[in-house]
Image (tube, rainbow, N blue to C red):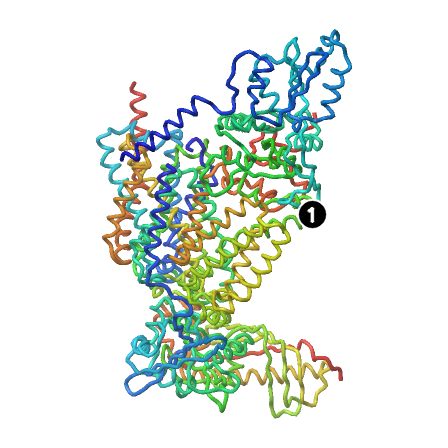
């Protein structure tokens, strides 16, 4: 028996030697792993821009740059094949971190692009999805002071924002998930070029796979409050009210709750309740924060202000018929299956009554007693 | 080697690891496709007939007083009837063992090694399985303990998904938008397959009837893992996205990331090799047991070798994953035959034997 | 063809010769006389012959085998101080044993006995006492806490070390002799009523079955009595420390010690026992537990670190996180070889360094360390020979391999590592997992003296886990490990 297993073992090793010449080797330094991809519209075709980190080591000098490749083609993968003729390395998509689409493309629907993203098992579902109002090519080819590598810059910029929870974390997975859900529409983050830097540019609102409109960076905070629970971050509220010209909070903690109430047949009302607390960091106004009554008053003003802003955002969403907050999911869960399939959620959503309630609590008023 | 008896806990884990396999990666999609909303409930529903089936198998053990299934059949049924039955069962079990590897390897090819020949990879796994099975069932069960341990360490990973889990995505509807209850039931039944092999373990198990409960334990462990994965998938993705994902579990693993490593799905999928070789090994072992009964003169390791060699050539016929799934669609009926038909046959044999004894 | 035949004939001829003249046993069966014995020891210039003419006595012995004090006290002084008539009385003393045949006499002299030839006959007096090493600390199994004494090469010393620490008449010692040329004494120790007699008999049977002409060390003996001599893993634990020996004895295991060897064989052993040290027990139990877990972690690191590096850099570039990717690519970009060659090269270098260091005296060994450190650590990276991340991984797995307390086991693990690196280099993660599966399949087949090698993990014995995977507090140890299959399971029931 022992003899036979030894024969088998040698057979096994022989076999493995045979596979050693496998074509599937992707030795790290010999491949070109694409980091950022941008798609723009060019007449009937798409222009793909790829950014590949390039590390050139000559003697003791090591250079870090991005190799930028551009091609025009009918599909993303076709562009890749064209592009691979231009580079010395095998182009692979296993390390794509960021996908960028221009609004021109997004407006026509991302469905055609999504196919390859879902089919190709090497594309990570953690890839960031970004919509650019303008040209992604310009962003990728641009030079930014202090940021020698654009791909990394974009990636880090978004990662930081996700980490701070100031913007919703939208990766490919979240996009697909909401795209397939019949009670929610997907969203994506936007960036733009501003002078010598890149800047966060709000949220792109989709209806199914089509880009409809966007929320400005100022609206994003109120949107985020309703979109997800927050465990950290800071925010500033400014108004004309002399009691509260400006106040900044940090260490905020928010909880959203969406409740659906049936108002007679075929009519539903949504109540979004936001529970929010934070510690004051800066206050410009006439009130004395050390006094309980004044604090309560200020909390009231803030509540009112946030509610107003949030409702504005909701109105905008409703006007665009983009259910980015997923109200539909909650409505669906309140209905029977038959009723849900019978109703046209799109119409119902546009005319639905959606109220926002804010419950703000000041945790502390900082290191200062007045 | 054979004088040591299988500890009941080993049996439970052996059953568990035979049941789980590649199917775990596909199950959430299957369930979502055929049952639609909240399809995971189907897993619980299917658990009931399977438990009854196990009870049927254990009743053979009780009535037969622990005798081997072959002894029971021999005592009540003429040999000329048994030969074709053994031939069919033996070949079907071997084919299942073979297809399990084939499927695993083809998915591997799809995901990671698109250029590497699946035949060579299958040969590597086949050799592993051969080495495993030739060690005998007792040592297989020991190796299985380590395999299960390595696989179970993945369970805590599921807690990471809790953050992205949302109940509202599951919807309150039950079995809506599914493509077919009957077809789905058979598929889910197929996912539970593996427990039927416990009928071949009778002479190897520890004495007494306590271990029979542990077949149920193994089966419950399977449903626990299946449910966990499926429910998390339903809340992590949603019921409309799941039918579009070939391997939802891999997509989910792909979402994980750690400071030192990310995209661990390929690595974790590789680790499922440990489950595959047990699943396949158990089927080959059972097939070998059947054939050895047929040709007792040939040493069992040679029987195993011949069985594995012949199935290896058959396994080259299906060329795509879809074909492999089709083959499974046929093989499941044979598996059902073993799961239900074989114990029933054994009960008949026992009755015949009893009648004969009373007569005499 | 004819050459082949000749060779085979040569072999068979030499075999016949051997059979005609068995090695080591005295040929003569003739009369027992001084001359015949002297003839046996022809050309043995180290044999001492001492004549006492007034008694017509002749003494034959090896001076270096004999303890001169005993010789003087028991043999020389009595013989010199008596008259011829008193000789018969003297011979009645117990140290004088009459010899009957030449073979016994020759063997006796070889064993350090003194042969006394007088007209009345031949007597053998045991005065064995050669030069021996003093009891020192163990080099290979040093400990920080606890007793520091270690076995040396003398069987009597070793037995005395054990008896000193184990004052019970239940400690039984069976003696065997192994090796036709070396005639090494081998002792089998066990505790009556605690050790399973099945194992004792099996071990005795195996020792008696050994046919080998020379035995130099107990580690060699292990390989002759193992269940699977071709396995990569050592199936019996060996130790130079009496405290380990004692604790294993009281667990119901069997100890085999051989003369001229400082190692004691512990049987049966489990794979996991190789990861325990006595220090675990001398530390607080929480610390002991942490140390044990650390060792298992080291085991995992040492077998997987470099092979995963190879698998990932060759096949699975997508698994590398973003912040590591650039630095990894950068350091790899200078290296002209594929990762597998790079890794094998570095691993081999480290192994060579280790081997060179182990053979050289400490002072030169340090030089090797410095040269190796500078050459490998800096120059290899600067020259673009290897990537620095590989250096880290190789160094880590090398360090981790030394965390495993048993040097023999650590060697096995390092060998497995090479297999895994090659497999990973060929099939990536798939190869790595294949290697792991092969290792587990192999492990689960192994038995040690018939007991499963991977106990208590498989077959599963949760009761034993508290003294294998962790080091539980002493109050929790109430049972002997199930591997020793002791008839007396409970630990605290020895008092009668």
In which quadrant is the N terminus of chain A drawn?
Answer: top left
SS type, badge 1: loop
- Indicate the position of residue B234 as horizontal and vertical percent values: 42, 62
| Nearer the observer, B149 or B223 | B149
- Indicate the position of residue C372 as horizontal and vertical percent values: 56, 59
Q: Residue at x 55, y 29 (%)?
A: C182
Q: Residue at x 63, y 44 (%)?
A: C141
User: Is A209 left or right of C456, judged from the image as shown?
Assistant: left
- Indicate the position of residue A288 as horizontal and vertical percent values: 72, 85
* Farthest residue, direction top: C85
Q: Is residue B145 visible?
A: yes
Q: Residue at x 62, y 78 (%)?
A: A360
Q: Is residue C297 visible?
A: no
* Farthest residue, direction right: C81
User: How many discs mark residues in the rendered view?
Assistant: 1
From what the image shows, is residue B293 above or below residue C428? above
| Nearer the observer, A200 or C376 | C376
From what the image shows, is residue C212 above or below residue B267? above
- Indicate the position of residue C318 as horizontal and vertical percent values: 42, 67
User: Is A362 left or right of B65, judged from the image as shown?
Assistant: right
In terms of image quadrants, where is residue A320?
A: bottom left
In terms of image quadrants, where is residue B91?
A: top left
* Farthest residue, direction front: C53
User: Is C390 left or right of B275, judged from the image as shown?
Assistant: right
- In the rendered structure, the residue with mark 1 lies on which chain? C
| Nearer the observer, A83 or C477 | A83
Q: Give the residue at mark 1.
A: C144
In which quadrant is the C terminus of chain A drawn?
Answer: bottom right
Q: Residues within 10 Å of mark 1 (few under 14, many from 20)?
A: few
| Nearer the observer, C318 or B230 | C318
């Amino acid at each position: 028996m022992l003899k036979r297993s030894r024969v088998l073992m040698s057979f096994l090793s022989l076999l493995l030697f045979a596979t050693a010449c496998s074509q599937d080797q992707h030795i790290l330094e010999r491949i070109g792993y694409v980091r950022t991809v941008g798609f723009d519209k060019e007449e009937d075709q798409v222009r793909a821009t790829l950014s590949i980190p390039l590390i050139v080591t000559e003697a003791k000098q090591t250079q870090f740059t991005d190799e930028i490749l551009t091609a025009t083609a009918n599909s993303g993968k076709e562009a890749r094949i064209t592009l691979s003729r231009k580079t010395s390395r095998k182009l692979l998509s296993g390390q794509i971190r960021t996908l960028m689409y221009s609004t021109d493309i997004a407006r026509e629907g991302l469905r055609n692009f999504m196919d390859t993203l879902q089919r190709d098992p090497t594309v990570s579902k953690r890839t960031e999805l970004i919509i650019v109002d303008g040209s992604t090519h310009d962003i990728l080819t641009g030079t930014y002071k202090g940021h020698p590598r654009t791909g990394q810059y974009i990636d880090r910029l978004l990662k930081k924002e996700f980490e701070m929870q100031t913007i919703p974390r939208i990766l490919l997975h979240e996009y697909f998930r909401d795209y397939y859900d019949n009670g929610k529409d997907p969203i994506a983050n936007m960036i733009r070029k501003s002078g010598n830097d890149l800047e966060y540019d709000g949220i792109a609102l989709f209806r199914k796979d089509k880009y409809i409109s966007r929320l400005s960076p100022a609206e994003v905070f109120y949107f985020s409050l309703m979109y997800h629970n927050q465990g950290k971050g800071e925010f500033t509220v400014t108004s004309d009210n002399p009691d509260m010209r400006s106040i900044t909070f940090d260490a905020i903690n928010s909880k959203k709750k969406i409740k659906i109430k049936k108002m007679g047949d075929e009519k539903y009302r949504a109540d979004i309740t936001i529970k929010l607390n934070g510690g004051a960091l800066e206050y410009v106004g006439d009130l004395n924060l050390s006094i309980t009554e004044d604090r309560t008053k200020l909390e009231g003003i803030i509540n009112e202000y946030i509610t107003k802003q949030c409702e504005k955002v909701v109105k905008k969403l409703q006007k665009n018929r983009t259910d980015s907050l997923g109200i539909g999911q909650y409505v669906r869960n309140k209905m029977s299956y038959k009723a849900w399939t019978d109703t046209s959620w799109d119409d119902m959503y546009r005319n639905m009554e959606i109220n926002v309630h804010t419950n703000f609590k000041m945790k502390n008023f900082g290191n200062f007693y007045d | 080697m054979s004088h040591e008896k299988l500890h009941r806990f080993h049996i439970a884990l052996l059953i568990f690891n035979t049941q789980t396999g590649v199917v775990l990666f596909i199950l959430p999609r299957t369930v979502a496709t055929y049952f639609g909303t909240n399809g995971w409930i189907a897993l619980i529903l299917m658990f009931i007939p399977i438990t009854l089936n196990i009870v049927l198998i254990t009743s053979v053990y009780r009535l037969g007083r622990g005798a081997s299934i072959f002894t029971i059949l021999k005592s009540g049924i003429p040999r000329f009837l048994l030969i074709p039955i053994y031939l069919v069962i033996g070949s079907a079990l071997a084919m299942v063992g073979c297809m399990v590897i084939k499927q695993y390897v083809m998915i591997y090819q799809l995901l990671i090694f698109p250029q590497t020949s699946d035949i060579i990879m299958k040969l590597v796994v086949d050799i592993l399985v051969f080495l495993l099975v030739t060690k005998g069932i007792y040592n297989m069960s020991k190796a299985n303990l380590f395999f299960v341990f390595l696989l179970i360490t993945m369970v805590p990973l599921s807690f990471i998904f809790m953050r992205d889990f949302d109940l509202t995505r599951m919807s309150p509807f039950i079995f809506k938008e599914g493509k077919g209850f009957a077809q789905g039931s058979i598929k889910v039944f197929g996912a539970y397959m593996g427990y039927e092999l416990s009928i071949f373990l009778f002479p190897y198990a520890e004495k007494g009837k306590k271990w029979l409960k542990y077949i149920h334990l193994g089966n419950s462990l399977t449903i626990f893992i299946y449910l966990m994965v499926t429910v998390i998938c339903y809340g992590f993705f949603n019921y409309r996205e799941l039918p579009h994902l070939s391997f939802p579990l891999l997509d989910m693993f792909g979402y994980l990331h750690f400071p030192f490593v990310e995209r661990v799905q390929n690595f974790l999928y590789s680790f499922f090799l440990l489950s595959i070789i047990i699943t396949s090994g158990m089927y080959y072992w059972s097939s070998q047991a059947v054939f050895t009964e047929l040709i007792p003169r040939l040493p069992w390791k040679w029987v195993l070798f011949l069985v594995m060699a012949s199935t290896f050539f058959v396994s080259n016929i299906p060329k795509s994953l879809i074909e492999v799934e089709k083959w499974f669609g046929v093989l499941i009926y044979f598996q059902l035959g073993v799961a239900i038909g074989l114990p029933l046959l054994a009960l008949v044999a026992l009755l015949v034997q009893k009648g004969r004894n009373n007569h005499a | 063809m004819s050459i082949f035949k000749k060779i085979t004939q040569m072999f068979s001829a030499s075999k016949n010769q051997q059979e005609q003249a068995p090695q080591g046993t005295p040929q003569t069966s003739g009369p027992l006389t001084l001359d015949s014995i002297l003839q046996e020891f022809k050309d043995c210039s180290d044999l001492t012959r001492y004549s006492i003419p007034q008694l017509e006595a002749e003494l034959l012995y090896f001076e270096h085998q004999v303890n001169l004090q005993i010789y003087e006290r028991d043999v020389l002084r009595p013989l010199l101080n008596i008259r011829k008539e008193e000789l018969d009385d003297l011979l009645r003393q117990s140290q004088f044993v009459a010899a009957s045949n030449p073979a016994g006499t020759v063997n006796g002299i070889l064993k350090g006995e003194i042969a006394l030839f007088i007209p009345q006959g031949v007597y053998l007096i045991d005065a064995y006492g050669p030069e021996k090493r003093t009891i020192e600390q163990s080099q290979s199994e040093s400990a920080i806490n606890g007793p520091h004494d270690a076995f040396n090469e003398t069987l009597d010393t070793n037995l005395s070390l054990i008896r000193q620490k184990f004052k019970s008449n239940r400690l039984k010692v069976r003696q065997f002799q192994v090796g036709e040329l070396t005639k090494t004494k081998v002792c089998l120790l066990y505790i009556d009523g605690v050790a399973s007699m099945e194992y004792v008999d099996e071990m005795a049977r195996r020792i008696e079955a050994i046919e080998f002409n020379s035995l130099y060390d107990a580690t060699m003996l292990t390989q002759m009595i193992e269940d699977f001599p071709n396995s990569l893993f050592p199936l019996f634990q060996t130790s130079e420390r009496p405290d380990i020996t004692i604790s294993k004895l009281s667990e119901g295991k069997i100890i085999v010690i051989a003369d001229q060897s400082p190692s004691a064989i512990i049987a049966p052993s489990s794979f996991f026992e190789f990861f325990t040290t006595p220090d675990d027990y001398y530390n607080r139990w929480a610390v002991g537990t942490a140390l044990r877990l650390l060792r298992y972690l080291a085991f995992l690191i040492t077998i997987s670190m470099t092979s995963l590096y190879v698998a990932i850099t060759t096949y699975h570039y997508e698994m590398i996180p973003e912040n590591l990717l650039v630095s990894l690519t950068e350091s790899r970009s200078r290296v002209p070889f594929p990762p597998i060659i790079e890794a094998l090269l570095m691993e081999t270098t480290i192994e060579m360094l280790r081997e060179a260091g182990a053979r050289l005296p400490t002072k030169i060994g340090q030089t090797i360390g410095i040269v190796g450190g500078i050459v490998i650590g800096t120059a290899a990276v600067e020259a673009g020979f290897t990537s620095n991340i590989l250096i880290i991984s190789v160094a880590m797995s090398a360090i981790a391999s030394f965390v495993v307390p048993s040097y023999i086991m650590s060697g096995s693990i390092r060998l497995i590592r090479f297999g895994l690196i090659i497999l990973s280099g060929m099939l990536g993660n798939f190869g790595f997992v294949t290697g792991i599966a092969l290792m587990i399949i192999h492990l689960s087949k192994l038995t040690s003296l018939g007991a499963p090698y991977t106990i208590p993990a498989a077959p599963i014995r949760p009761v034993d886990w508290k003294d294998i995977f962790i080091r539980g507090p002493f109050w929790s140890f109430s049972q002997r490990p199930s591997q020793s299959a002791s008839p007396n399971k409970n630990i605290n029931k020895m008092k009668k």
